[in-house]
Amino acid sequence: MISWLLGSPPPPWHYLDEIFQEYKNVAVYLNAYGNIEIIKVSDIDEFHAPTSVLISGYYLLTLKPYYIKLRKFVAFPTRRLAVIKRLIKCPRWRSMEYYYKDEFLIGWLIYDCDNCKEKQRLHLEVNEENMSDNEILETHLQIYNS
C-alpha cells in the first residue's frame, strides 16, 4: 500500500502526516542518497511494543530517521554517549544504546510525550555534526521544554 514511497526522495513532513494519519506509530528512514529505504508502521498497543517502529542502532550507522510518529513518545538518535548519559538523568527519559564490543556506536533517546509531532520533528532536525556535547544537550532540552 505505501510501498510506492520506497526508493523516492521524502515528501514534506506534513504530507507524511496525512499519509500515516491512521497509524499510531510510524517511522521513515532514508539511505545515504536521501531516498526512502525503510518504512515501519505499527498499530500494536503501546503496552506491548511502544517503540516497535524504531530500528536497531546498527542500521542507524547507514540510515537516517526522517519521520517518526509515536503516539506516546518522542524518539531520536545520537552518536554522543555523553549526551545520552546526561539526558537519561532527566525524569521520563530513557535510552537504547548500541555497542560493538566495548565501543559505543549510537543510541536512541526516548521520552514520554503524548502526540508531540512538532517536538519530534525538531529533535530529528538537530544536526550534531558541528555541535559540542553541551550545544546538543541545550538544543534538545530547549525542544523538550518548549
Image: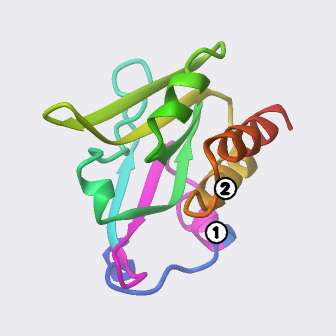
x, y percent for residue 50? 42, 29
Q: Is residue 117 magenta?
A: no
**Does the image show residue 8?**
yes
Identify which residue, 128 or 34, lies in the foreground. Answer: 128
Residue ranking furthest to the right: 146
Q: Nearer the viewer, mark 1 or mark 2?
A: 2
* Image point (31%, 75%), residue name: 3
For mark 2, give the secondary structure. Answer: helix
The range drawn in magenta is 15-36
Residue ranking furthest to the front: 132
* Image point (34%, 32%), residue name: 97
* Image point (40%, 34%), residue name: 51
Q: Is residue 104 above or below residue 2?
A: above
x, y percent for residue 121? 66, 55
The residue that label 1 is drawn on is 13
The label shown at residue 121 is: 2
Label 1 packing within 10 angstroms: few (<14), some (14-19), many (20+): some
Identify which residue, 42 or 78, lies in the foreground. Answer: 78
* Image point (55%, 34%), residue name: 83
Could you tell whether 82 is left or right of 59 in the image? right
x, y percent for residue 102? 19, 31
Quadrant into which the C terminus falls: top right
Instruction: Name which residue type carries label 2.
Output: Arg
Q: Is residue 27 magenta?
A: yes
x, y percent for residue 20? 53, 60
Identify which residue, 65 or 17, lies in the foreground. Answer: 65
Quarter of image, res 48? top left
Alpha carbon separation for disc pair 1 and 2: 8 Å
Quarter of image, res 112? top right
Q: Tell whether label 2 touches label 1 (CB within 8 Å).
A: yes
Could you tell whether 110 is left or right of 5 in the image? right
